[in-house]
Amino acid sequence: MTHRRAGKTVACIEELHRAATACPSLRPRFAYLAPFLRQSKAVAWDYLRAAIARGRAVGASAHEGELRVDYPNGGQVRLYGADNPDAMRGIYLDGIVLDEYADMDPRVWSEIIRPALADRRGWAVFIGTLGFFSACMFLFLRLLPAVSISELKTLLPEAEVTVEHEAEVHH
């Protein structure tokens, strides 16, 4: 979380470009997601086209109509908007950057992005500004129940002592 104009998007687009060219998986797929497709294009498309300038000599190409960059190794980076989440259903992803996640419907993550990443054990980077912090907190709190009790005891060994002590007090 940093202030506006700190370079988050540029850094993440560069990482998507690097990952798409270096990923050892077959036909690697990476994405940048903003709250609106028009926002994705306005914010990130020029940075992505600039990132592939060095790769054009070896076959990297940009497809403006699809907001997609193809690499010689079969990799792709594509821009999406959370305003049309159905456009992402059924895809797989090796990595994604979610920009201004606080402005997206949380179901985009749980119903579309997370399953797309699970197929390939992909990664996600959430970037944004201060409003983003509260969205991350809600996401964390929503996922917290998924942590099993045994994992908590491993992470917090003193929790086991506290539970045992409470059991002795009630008997």
Image (spheres, rainbow, N blue to C red):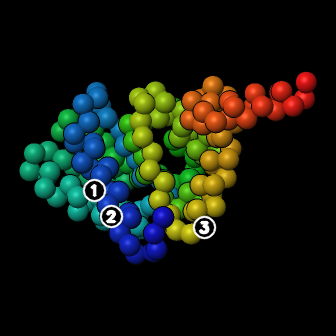
Q: Quadrant of residue 123?
A: top left
Q: Quadrant of residue 101?
A: bottom right
For the point 53% across and 40% down, which residue is it?
A: 113
Residue to which mark 3 is pinned: 131
Instruction: Pinpoint residue 35: horizontal percent, then vertical percent.
Output: 55, 59
Helix, strand, or loop for circle 2? helix
**Of the residues shown, which amino acid type is indicated by label 2?**
Val
For the point 28% across and 27% down, which residue is it?
A: 26
CA–CA distance between discs 3 and 1? 24 Å
Q: Earlier in the sequence, mark 3 or mark 1?
A: 1
For the point 42% across and 68% down, which residue is it?
A: 42
Instruction: Pinpoint residue 90: horizontal percent, then vertical percent.
Output: 51, 32
Q: Does residue 65 appear to the left or right of 107 in the view shown?
A: left
Helix, strand, or loop for circle 1? helix
Instruction: Pinpoint residue 103: horizontal percent, then vertical percent.
Output: 61, 61
Q: Are marks 3 and 2 in contact (CB under 8 Å)?
A: no
Choose between 120 and 138: the one closer to the eye: 138
Residue 37 seen in render? no
Residue to which mark 2 is pinned: 10
CA–CA distance between discs 2 and 1? 6 Å
Q: Earlier in the sequence, mark 3 or mark 2?
A: 2
For the point 27% across and 50% down, which residue is it?
A: 17
Disc 2 crowd, CA 10 A, few/some/many (<14, 14-19, 20+): some
In the rendered view, would you say 27 is above or below 62? above
Helix, strand, or loop for circle 3? helix
Quarter holding the C terminus? top right
In the rendered view, would you say 131 is above or below 52? below
Residue to which mark 1 is pinned: 14
Q: Are marks 2 and 1 in contact (CB under 8 Å)?
A: yes
Q: Does residue 46 appear to the left or right of 132 in the view shown?
A: left
**Of the residues shown, which amino acid type is indicated by label 1?**
Glu
CA–CA distance between discs 3 and 2? 20 Å
